[in-house]
Structure formats: structure tokens, C-alpha cells
Image: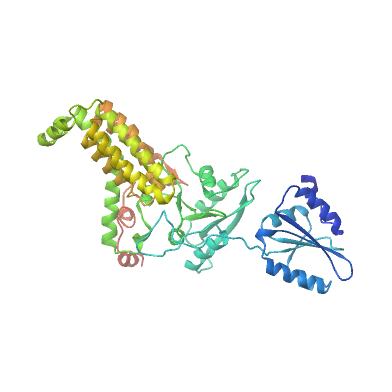
């Protein structure tokens, strides 16, 4: 097959027909449409039926049938290699072969059914644009271009996947992006080799700095406004055809705590909410381990009345505190996954009813104490406060090793676990940018748009 694809387009239509029939053997979706012109010369059209605009195709056929004059076809691209013809046909183009022409015309008549533009479900916004990316690359690029109508916005087209031949674009604003960042992105993409590219997640795993790190080093988003603001801030975006998730790089630790509407609301409210998100993140990771450590090893640190209440509730419980907490955390994560995987009509109902029934039944049966149910529920609620789903995942995973350390070593174990996490975060980089930047080293820039957001009026005045 590779040998057939490497040959030139033949002057005889029948020779091209036979070669393409061999290449597209057992491809039921490929249409071969031979026609006879008025002077009895042959013409051949090759296309994919469900990816072609039938009305425009019939117009071309009518024009060719009326006269053999190929002036109507001169507006289309011509190629001389069968390999190029095959690649374009698989992308939705229509190949037209004429007798006596050692090349093929390629008409872009692609008409691919796609999902309508809608609000992204994973990044809902109270205030701001309600449009999200679709699976069509051209539509996604047009939404970005509409927000940044300037010639410095660049879209570099690439292709990857030996079997999928998927197009993807590297987007950046030329005057804002650092040249060394752009060179590093291009270098990593050049070394990206794979047989298949079906989603942006394939690229993410190949080009991130440390693939074994729990923390994401590349941000993903479905919102064009988030991509546009990131490009204006000097970041680089990667948009893959067939994926509604764009990649933004580099990513810092603070990017995961910033929601889409943070730049549309007043800065005082946004700053307060960001601090609350950060506190809830700490709560989602540390609350179970700190509770287990205090009740098991350091009861003297708990107020007497509260400790007496906890002790009474634990009477008759057959499991140690660390075991019952682990069991409830595993059950909660199981209910969350079940709610995500089940159909939407019953997913939320199953997770809510399951949590209520299992929690109440476990307390009534004496297997689990009531404070543990409250601790696990509070931890679960805190874990939903993350604007970025990718950044919430490491906190959900780290909760378990920290819980085990707290159950066996007390607060010392929790402190050791937190210390190792901090050492990892300090040493982590995303495309040469420190992961905790600009908090380390701390400076005035840290207070502009990280943990809090400064008033845009004062920031603009400072730039002047």
C-alpha cells in the first residue's frame, strides 16, 4: 500500500481509480464516482459521503458535465502525488481526476456534523461569556480570533499521529510571549511521536516536565475567554482538532485557584473568594488526617468539652479512628465516581441518596461514629470548591497518604507529609517557570493576580 501511495498521479483516470481502490480496500465510506463527459472522456470523483457537502458537489458535477472546460476547477488546489490525495480525501476534501491531466484537483467541500457552541459544563460561570469550545478546530480558532483581533495573534498549524493524522495548533501573541518559552514548546512538540492523537491529553502527557508528579503542570480549559486572557498574559495555547479542551502553558500552582469570572467581578469580592478557595483546598487535604492525629495521639490539644463529646460518640465503635476514616473516605470517593459515570438523570440522585443512607445506617449500626461522617462530608464539600478539576485530583489522592501518616505518627506524620509535598512543589517547574511562581521569591507581583486580585485601575496606572 505504501508503494502505491508514493506514485505520481497518472494521466489515465482508470489507473488512478485502480490505485486508489487498492489503497482504500474495505473502506466502505469512500465513494468512487466515475462519470462520462460529453466528449466521452472520463472523470473520477473520490470523496467521503458523510463528510462532503452534497449540494456543492452536485454543482461541480453539473459544471463538468456541461463542458469539458476545466476553468471551473482552476480555483482548486492541484496535487501530483497520490499520497497527498489520500491524506486530503481523509480530511474531507473531494479529489477530481480528469483524463489527460497528470494531477488531481482538490475541492474543499467538507461538511462535518459538529456539536453546537454551548456553555462548558465543567467551567460554569456566573458572569461572563457563556460559550465553550467544540470539537471543531476551525470553530475554536474563530472564537479566539474574535476576542483578539490583532495580527500579532499567531496560529501555527501542526500534525501528529501516524494513524490519525490529527491537526493541532500552537497559539500565541507574538508581542507578549517570551521567545525562549516558544522555542521550548516547539522543541518538545518536535519530539512528540505517537501513532494516535485523539485528544489534547495525549500531548499533555508527552510534553509536561514531570509526568510522575501528582500536580498538573499544564492547564486545560474549555473556555475561549480563558485562552484569550492567557495568551494576552504571554502564555501559549495548544488546540487539538476533535478536542474541546485547550492546553495552556506554563501553569503555576495559583492558576488552579482562579475561576473564569474572576476578572469580571469586583476585585474585593474576587480576592476574598480566592482566599476562601485556598483555605478550602487545605481543608480538603488535611482535615481528615489532622482529626485522626488529634483524637488518636494528641487529645490534650482538643477542648475538654469537645473531646468528651467525641469520646461518647465513639463508644462501641469496633474500628480505630484511622480505619473508620479510611473506610468512609473510600466510600465517599466511590459514590462520587458512581455519580459521574451514571446517566445524568440518576447520577446525582444515587450519590446523594447513597451518602445519606449509607452514612445514617453506618452510624445507627455502630460501625462509624457521627463525627467521622461530618469530617468526611466537610472534606468532600471543600474538594468541590476547586475551579480546576485537574488541580482537585492531587488533593483527593494526597488525602489518603496523609491520613495514614496521621493515624500512625500523629501530627508529626502529617508535618512530614506536608514537608515532602512542599519540597516537591518548590522543585517543580512548568516549561522553566517555577511552579509556585511568583510566590517564591515573594514580591509585589505576587499580590497582583495570584492569591488575590488587584484593582485593574491601579494595575494599569502602575504600568504607565
Residue at 33% x, 65% y is 456
Residue 406 seen in the current view:
no
Q: Is residue 464 positioned above or below 251 on the image? A: below
Q: Is 240 or 122 nearer to us in this picture?
A: 122
- Location of residue 288 in the rendering, given as x and y in whole percent from the top left corner: 27, 36
Disc tally is: 0
Q: Is residue 170 left or right of residue 404?
A: right
- Location of residue 41 in the rendering, given as x and y in whole percent from the top left corner: 88, 66
Instruction: Specify the farthest residue to the right.
Output: 39
Q: Is 67 or 427 nearer to us in this picture?
A: 67
Q: Quadrant of the C terminus?
A: bottom left
Within the image, what quadrant is residue 50 found in? bottom right
Q: Is residue 199 left or right of residue 435?
A: right
Residue at 43% x, 59% y is 226
Q: Is residue 294 positioned above or below 349 on the image? A: above
- Location of residue 401 in the rendering, given as x and y in whole percent from the top left corner: 34, 32
- Location of residue 12 in the rendering, given as x and y in whole percent from the top left corner: 87, 58
Residue 54 seen in the current view:
yes
Amino acid at each position: 500500500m505504501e508503494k502505491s501511495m508514493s506514485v505520481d498521479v497518472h494521466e489515465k483516470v482508470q489507473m488512478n481509480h485502480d490505485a486508489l481502490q487498492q489503497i482504500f480496500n474495505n473502506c466502505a465510506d469512500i465513494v468512487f464516482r466515475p462519470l462520462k463527459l460529453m466528449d466521452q472522456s472520463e472523470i473520477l470523483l473520490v470523496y467521503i459521503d458523510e463528510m462532503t457537502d452534497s449540494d456543492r458537489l452536485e454543482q461541480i458535477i453539473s459544471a463538468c458535465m456541461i463542458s469539458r472546460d476545466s476553468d471551473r476547477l482552476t480555483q482548486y488546489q492541484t496535487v501530483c502525488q497520490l499520497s497527498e490525495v489520500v491524506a486530503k480525501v481523509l480530511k474531507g476534501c473531494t479529489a477530481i481526476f480528469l483524463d489527460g491531466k497528470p494531477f488531481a484537483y482538490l475541492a474543499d467541500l467538507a461538511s462535518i456534523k459538529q456539536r453546537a457552541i454551548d456553555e462548558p459544563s465543567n467551567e460554569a460561570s456566573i458572569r461572563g461569556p457563556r460559550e465553550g469550545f467544540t470539537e471543531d478546530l476551525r470553530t475554536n480558532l474563530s472564537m479566539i480570533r474574535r476576542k483578539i483581533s490583532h495580527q500579532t495573534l499567531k496560529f501555527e498549524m501542526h500534525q501528529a499521529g501516524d494513524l490519525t493524522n490529527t491537526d493541532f495548533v500552537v497559539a500565541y501573541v507574538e508581542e507578549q510571549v517570551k521567545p525562549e518559552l516558544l522555542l521550548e514548546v516547539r522543541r518538545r512538540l518536535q519530539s512528540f511521536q505517537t501513532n494516535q492523537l485523539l485528544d489534547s491529553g495525549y500531548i499533555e502527557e508527552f510534553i509536561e516536565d514531570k509526568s510522575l508528579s501528582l500536580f498538573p503542570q499544564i492547564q486545560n480549559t474549555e473556555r475561549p475567554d480563558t485562552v484569550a486572557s492567557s495568551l494576552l498574559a504571554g502564555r501559549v495555547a495548544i488546540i487539538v482538532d476533535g478536542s474541546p479542551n485547550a492546553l495552556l502553558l506554563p501553569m503555576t500552582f495559583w492558576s488552579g485557584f482562579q475561576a473564569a469570572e474572576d476578572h469580571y467581578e469586583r476585585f474585593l469580592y474576587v480576592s476574598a473568594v480566592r482566599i476562601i478557595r485556598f483555605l478550602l483546598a487545605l481543608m480538603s487535604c488535611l482535615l481528615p488526617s489532622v482529626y485522626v492525629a488529634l483524637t488518636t495521639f494528641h487529645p490534650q490539644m482538643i477542648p475538654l468539652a469537645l473531646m468528651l463529646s467525641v469520646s461518647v460518640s465513639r463508644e462501641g465503635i469496633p474500628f480505630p479512628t484511622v480505619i473508620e476514616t479510611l473506610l468512609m473516605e473510600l466510600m465517599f470517593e466511590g459514590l462520587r465516581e458512581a455519580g459521574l459515570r451514571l446517566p445524568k438523570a440518576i447520577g446525582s440522585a444515587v450519590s446523594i441518596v447513597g451518602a445519606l443512607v449509607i452514612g445514617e445506617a453506618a452510624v445507627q449500626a455502630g460501625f462509624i461514629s457521627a463525627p467521622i461522617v461530618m469530617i468526611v462530608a466537610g472534606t468532600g464539600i471543600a474538594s468541590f470548591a476547586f475551579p480546576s478539576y485537574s488541580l482537585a485530583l492531587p488533593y483527593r489522592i494526597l488525602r489518603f497518604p496523609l491520613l495514614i501518616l496521621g493515624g500512625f505518627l500523629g501530627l508529626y506524620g502529617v508535618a512530614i507529609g506536608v514537608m515532602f509535598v512542599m519540597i516537591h512543589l518548590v522543585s517543580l517547574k512548568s516549561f522553566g517557570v517555577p511552579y509556585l511562581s511568583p510566590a517564591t521569591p515573594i514580591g509585589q507581583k505576587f499580590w497582583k493576580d495570584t492569591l488575590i486580585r488587584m484593582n485593574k485601575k491601579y494595575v494599569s496606572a502602575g504600568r504607565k
